[in-house]
Image (cartoon, rainbow, N blue to C red):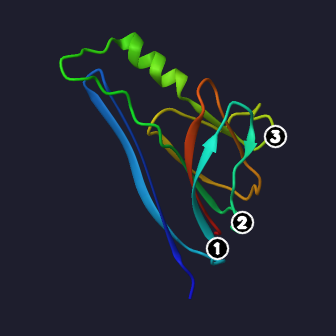
Amino acid sequence: MANTLTISYGLTVTGDGNTVKQTGTFIVDQVGLNYILNIQDIGLAAEAVLLGDAAPGFLCFKNVKDKLVASPGQTLTAQQILDYYNANLISIGNDALVATVVAKLGPQEGVVIPTTTTVWYAKALVTAGQLAVLCADA
């Protein structure tokens, strides 16, 4: 029996007194049975993302770096937050140098990508980090 993949997405834009929202979920019966969940160390040089025996149908990437949190009694400036965010970005692409960036993830950000591309690469931009990777056959 095939596994079932449930993919959820959403985007909400607020401002000017308006809120625009698009969300959804769809379900796919997995053709294969392979999937992998991996936490991979990502350095400053582009490196192949480890996918095991799973042939991508869907990839989910998440930068697992914690968000910046103020210490008790501390107030963070917008610049401190931005500097921390930019120092912990991880770029993802499907070329060996990650010259074409498909996704750029800050701390605790993630993305789901439907794909048939079998080789993916990631690199940290300033500080080495860790990337959670969930890949499933479609």
Q: Which mark is residue 128?
A: none
Q: Is residue 58 left or right of residue 77?
A: right
Q: Does 132 sit above or below residue 27?
A: above
Q: Between disc 3 and disc 2, whose residue precedes?
A: 2
Q: Are marks 2 and 1 in contact (CB under 8 Å)?
A: yes
Separation of disc 1 and disc 3 at Cα? 24 Å
Label 3 SS = loop
Residue located at (64% from left, 40% from top) = 42
10 Å crowding of disc 3: few (<14), some (14-19), many (20+):
some
The spot of residue 68 in percent (x, y) is: 37, 27
Q: How many marks?
A: 3
Residue located at (30% from left, 15% from top) = 76
10 Å crowding of disc 2: few (<14), some (14-19), many (20+):
many
Write down the residue under mark 2.
Answer: 55
Q: Is residue 10 left or right of residue 33?
A: left
Q: Amino acid at mark 3?
A: Ala
Write down the residue under mark 1.
Answer: 34
Instruction: Name the quarter where the C terminus is drawn.
Output: bottom right
Which one is nearer the viewer's eye here, 57 or 52? 52
10 Å crowding of disc 1: few (<14), some (14-19), many (20+):
some
Q: Which mark is residue 96?
A: 3
Q: Does 127 sit above or below residue 116?
A: above
Separation of disc 2 and disc 1 at Cα? 8 Å
Q: Amino acid at mark 2?
A: Ala
